[in-house]
Image (cartoon, helix red, strand yellow):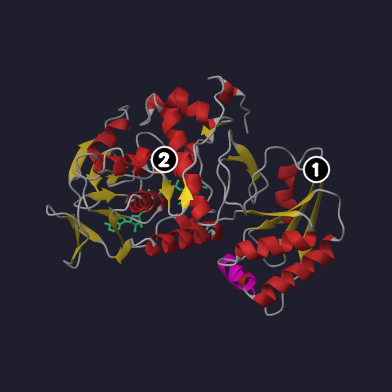
Amino acid sequence: MTPGAVTVVGRGPAGLFAATLLAAAGLSVHVVSSSSGTLPLWSGRFNFRDWDQGMVVDNPWDWWMEHGEQHFVGGTARARWRRLWSIWRAVGQQLGMDSAIPERNRWTVTPLGRRRPVFWTPPWELALDRAPVAVAVVGLEGLLDFEPELVADGFQGPGAVRTLRLPWPPDWHRGWNTVRWGAFLDTGSGADWLEQQLVRALGRGPAGELVVLPQVLGLSRTDVLHQRLERRLDRLVREVGLAPPGLGGMRLEARWTAWLLSSGVQMHHGRVRAIRDAGGITLTDGRPVGEGPVILATGGILGGGVCLSADGTGVDAIHRRLLGQLAEGDDPARALQWGLVLGDGGVAGRQTAGCDPDVHGDGGAVCLWTAAEAVDRVVPGLVDRLSRIGTVEVAVLDVSVRGPQTHKEAQRV
Ligand SMILES: Cc1cc2nc3c(=O)[nH]c(=O)nc-3n(C[C@H](O)[C@H](O)[C@H](O)COP(=O)(O)OP(=O)(O)OC[C@H]3O[C@@H](n4cnc5c(N)ncnc54)[C@H](O)[C@@H]3O)c2cc1C
């Protein structure tokens, strides 16, 4: 029987995605969380699979086809991934972040000038298929998180690369961090200042030059600022994600939360102490919140309701009940099974069944997959039936089917 309401614990990417699927299907959704999730710590790009034993994965679609059985994905990987990324594209479009789902990994440059693979990125972020013909890397005086000379190292290739540094703006103070820079550039005077400085510093420049800036171009008016700069400079402008806090993730979280609220999702603040037999949860202060089955998207080391200690002991994130113990050499996929005893709902989130987002670069994708599995557990078949996210139709994603070995066109980095 389909429940009328579902409660999601956690508002990281896994919890927000689960809530999105449920809300898009017309269910009543409660999201309960004790704090923000991790989104404000990163740039908002969703990894698919970046690394395999230290090698860059060129084609993550094929990688999952070959390795899905060893994780939680199984043999239907391509069709399911295609479905999930189509839905994710529609979510992005609904949130004003219309970025295509690529057929293979692209690359970006880190603030330390290293190239690294990227998959889905919001439109403001640097993501390239090939070396640009010319690049201007523009730093801001006083913003130590982004040294243009270091970043420029990542663009070595045939294209011309130049570095520039804009002077301090009026009223700048040495205490300005990236969030303060973002707030300044959201203002009319901040946007005017940046435009004038860029026009002056860049001059005419070579044709087709790409302008690369640190990720500080506003929090709430980023799209307007990007469009304005690109029109005025007649060049593409892209940002490089910086060390936490991440303005890209903050933008994504703000848009996503606003959309969920406008779609009728109820957001609650508080720490969950127990899952109620009657549905919903109980907070530590004793208040009952929410209704229906509960999906745990509580993040942490193993994620999705299971906390794994370094000694291999697994406890559930809510009641702290002992779920099991992994011995040396055990398959971490066993720990995923522990999550399944935690009530009617599913578990969603990071580092499930042997996937470590920090080592493998698959955090975003694992959130999508596990959130969708949890939602399907609560309402069987929901993910396949979903035809729209808000006003946006979920299109069928056309990703060309390639040979199974293509991810091995990899290079050591
Ligand atoms: C610094 C950093 C950079 C990253 N960069 C990338 C990247 O570039 N690309 C990418 O794809 N992924 C990235 N990730 C994502 C990461 O790999 C994970 O996939 C992601 O953080 C997991 O999200 P989640 O929704 O499972 O959990 P989280 O985001 O950790 O959210 C957990 C939520 O559960 C709530 N919660 C927990 N316990 C309770 C309780 N008892 N009661 C109420 N609420 C509770 C918390 O308050 C929080 O809201 C990054 C993460 C970090 C930290």
- Residue stretch rendered in magenta on the structure: 172-185
Residue 129 pos. (x, y %):
68, 38
Residue at horizontal 45%, vertical 44%? 87
Using the rendered image of the protein, determine whether residue 172 is visible from the camera's viewpoint. no
Using the rendered image of the protein, determine whether residue 401 is visible from the camera's viewpoint. yes
Q: Quadrant of the N terminus?
A: top left
Name the residue nearer the viewer: 264 or 38: 264
Q: Is residue 348 above or below residue 104?
A: below
Query: Can you tell me whether the CB of the residue at mark 2 lies under 8 Å from the nearest atom of ligand 1?
Result: yes
The residue beneath circle 2 is: 366
The residue beneath circle 1 is: 133
Name the residue nearer the viewer: 391 or 413: 391
Q: Is residue 399 above or below residue 174?
A: above
Q: How many marks?
A: 2
Real-space CA distance between mark 2 and mark 1, rounded to the nearest whole angstrom: 35 Å
**Which amino acid, by three-letter code, is at mark 1?**
Val
Q: Is residue 122 above or below residue 408?
A: below
Residue 88 pos. (x, y %):
47, 45
